[in-house]
Image (tube, coloured by chain):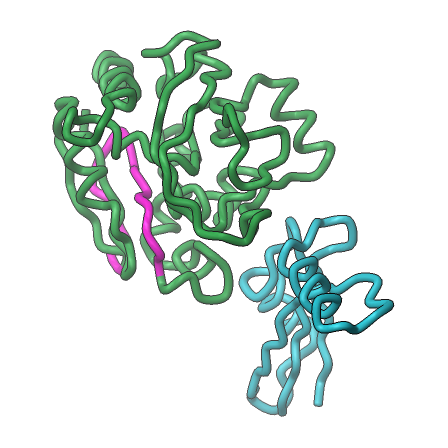
Chain colours: A green, B cyan
């Protein structure tokens, strides 16, 4: 599987993402935000961080960068994309995922490991888990309070597009939503960090199944 | 020409920052602050003749996130 990790000014989980993908066996290329073209890849990973200093809104400026036009085109062609933390914010700002991430309900930056429920395993990202599994991933965000209008929320539930929910909601997200899929199930956006849970040195390896599962699915595709 | 864009969370979208400001005003002893909504003001210095339609596009493509925010343009 070939993967590109997008790097914005202010990205700080880009190398962690690359390490996690490589550990699972992916061939990873780092792509600077000013590049207008993506290399030929199966997966685009939009990493966490504070792209453009979170100016205006988290992810808003990054979503207008040259590479994001190519990311949108990649997804529209049926390509896979994973957005974690700031990457999730960027994907909502581009419109590739519905809803928005607002300031945490408690107004504080939250940095801790949280328990998540795997809600569906019917997609390439979470097929390595079973629906109903619980996993521990770190979160580190100030703006992870997911919101969406009532129609959008009904669609997420109706089409089985909620991938992860929080066991103990840390940020006020509607219906405890921690991660969602696009309608074609090929884009996953999530606030918790699976790439920070892939090595025993991280204190847990619950994220490995996401990267290994993805690799298995996309390599066979 | 100058334009001032006011960006606010839409009605019905919970505003935790506004709620915190409201709470702080109460703590200072100000009574009767029934709600606080916090938004942004963005001032644009534009070429003369920039159309209202163009400004609206600026707002909808970047300045406001139309999922959760609304905007109002004041041409100065």
Q: Which residues are magenta?
A: A34-51
Question: Which part of the image, by quadrant, shows the C terminus of chain B?
Answer: bottom right
> In this image, B28 relative to A183: left or right?
right
Q: Quadrant of residue A140?
A: top left
Residue A219, given in percent of the width and then of the height, sits at 21, 17
Residue A176, given in percent of the width and then of the height, sits at 57, 30
Closer to the camera in the image, A148 or A62: A148
Q: How many callouts does the rendering have?
A: 0
Whether residue B72 is situated above or below residue A38 in the rendered picture: below
A48 magenta-colored: yes
Residue A95, given in percent of the width and then of the height, sits at 52, 44
- Residue visible at 60% across and 56% down? B65
- Residue visible at 42% across and 58% down? A64
B30 magenta-colored: no
Q: Main secondary structure of the magenta part?
A: loop
- Residue visible at 27% across and 61% down? A9
Question: Which part of the image, by quadrant, shows the N terminus of chain B?
Answer: bottom right
- Residue visible at 73% across and 71% down? B72
Closer to the camera in the image, A57 or A216: A57
Q: Quadrant of residue A88?
A: top left
Residue A85, given in percent of the width and then of the height, sits at 39, 42
Closer to the camera in the image, B19 or B26: B26
**Res. A93 visible in picture:** yes
Whether residue A39 is situated above or below residue A188 in the rendered picture: below
> In this image, B48 relative to A59: left or right?
right
**Res. A184 visible in picture:** no
Residue placed farthest to the right in the image? B32
């Amino acid at each position: 599987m070939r993967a590109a990790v997008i790097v914005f000014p202010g990205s700080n989980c880009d190398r962690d993402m690359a390490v996690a993908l490589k550990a699972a066996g992916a061939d990873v290329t780092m792509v600077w935000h000013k590049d207008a073209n993506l290399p030929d890849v199966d997966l685009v990973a939009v990493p966490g961080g504070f792209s453009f200093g979170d100016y205006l809104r988290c992810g808003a400026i990054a979503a207008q960068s040259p590479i994001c036009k190519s990311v949108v085109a990649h997804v529209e062609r049926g390509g896979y994309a994973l957005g974690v933390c700031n990457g999730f914010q960027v994907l909502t700002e581009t419109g590739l995922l519905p809803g928005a991430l607002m300031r945490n309900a408690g107004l504080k930056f939250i940095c801790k490991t949280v328990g998540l429920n795997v809600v569906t395993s019917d997609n390439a990202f979470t097929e390595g888990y079973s629906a109903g599994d619980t996993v521990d991933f770190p979160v580190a965000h100030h703006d992870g309070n997911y919101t969406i209008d009532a129609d959008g929320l009904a669609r997420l539930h109706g089409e089985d597009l909620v991938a992860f929910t929080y066991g103990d909601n840390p940020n006020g997200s509607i219906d405890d939503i921690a991660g969602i899929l696009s309608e074609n199930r090929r884009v996953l956006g999530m606030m918790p960090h699976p790439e920070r849970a892939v090595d025993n040195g991280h204190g847990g390896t619950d994220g490995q199944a996401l990267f290994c599962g993805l690799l298995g699915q996309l390599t066979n595709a | 020409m100058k334009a001032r864009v006011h960006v606010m969370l839409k009605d019905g979208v919970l505003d935790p920052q506004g709620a915190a400001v409201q709470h702080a005003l109460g703590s200072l002893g100000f009574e009767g602050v029934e709600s606080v909504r916090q938004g942004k003001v963005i001032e644009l210095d534009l070429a003369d003749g920039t159309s209202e339609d163009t400004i609206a596009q600026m707002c909808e493509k970047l300045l406001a996130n139309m999922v959760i925010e609304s905007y109002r343009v004041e041409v100065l």
